[in-house]
Image (cartoon, rainbow, N blue to C red):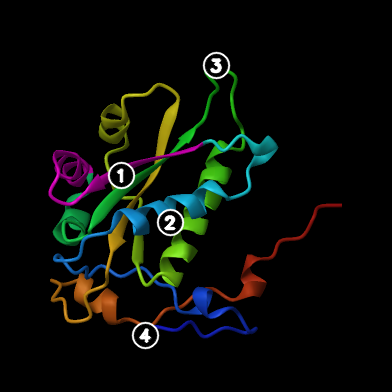
Amino acid sequence: MKNATTTAPLHPLLTERWSPRAFDNRHELSKEQLTTLLEAARWAPSASNTQPWRFAVAERGTEAHTKVLEALAPGNQVWAHAASALIVAAAETTTPDGTERPWAVYDTGQAVAHLSVQAQHDGIAVHQLGGFDRARVTELLGQPGLTPQVVLAVGRRDEFGVLAEPFAEREAAPRDRVPVENLLVSIAA
């Protein structure tokens, strides 16, 4: 386990959650597991209850998985291929009539956070990837108004998985964050 060292007591779902790169390439997400993750995302809060998040699920072994994997940055392809699924989280940034949804990206992030915490609860690992070809993934989604935000590698962590460097070192490194005081800013007078 790579438990976080915190300055205040947090729920174990938060302190134990981390983003591994070593996935068990034999693990398959069950329909029930996938449904549970998406249900957790569905119940995230959103501005005016617009629920602007959309998810494209590409399970390993499918053509969709291959296409999403090919859109990842080369360094992510090296390890993400073993994940049970690659899930594209996209924000519906405009309404069908073209009205901008200014909170869609924020709301989609909340949905992904809910999915990640539920996954931790269920013993499923999630690694969020920003390294992907946004134009290519937008093309794969094929829906105007959808802006890909992140690709989620989802599956069971492989405790004995062998990763190439620099990924092996990152996998073993302790978790750290900047101190809370570094996150605070003042409100201008």
The residue sitting at 18% across, 62% down in the picture is 79
Q: CA distance from mark 2 to mark 3?
A: 32 Å
Residue behind mark 1: 57
- Number of the label disc, if any, that sits on residue 36: 2
Image coords of residue 88 (percent x, y): 34, 44
Name the image quarter holding residue 22: bottom left
Q: CA distance from mark 3 to mark 1?
A: 26 Å
| Residue range highlighted in magenta | 53-71
Q: Is residue 63 magenta?
A: yes
Mark 1 packing: few (<14 Cα in 10 Å), some, or many (20+)? some
Mark 2 packing: few (<14 Cα in 10 Å), some, or many (20+)? some
Amino acid carrying label 4: it is Met
Q: CA distance from mark 1 to mark 4?
A: 28 Å
- Number of the label disc, if any, that sits on residue 1: 4
Q: Is residue 61 magenta?
A: yes
Amino acid carrying label 3: it is Gly
Q: CA distance from mark 2 to mark 1?
A: 13 Å
Element under disc 1: strand
Amino acid carrying label 2: it is Thr
Looking at the picture, tell me which residue is in the foreground, 155 or 187.
155
**Mark 3 or mark 4: whose residue is earlier in sequence:** 4
Residue behind mark 3: 98
**Mark 2 or mark 1: whose residue is earlier in sequence:** 2
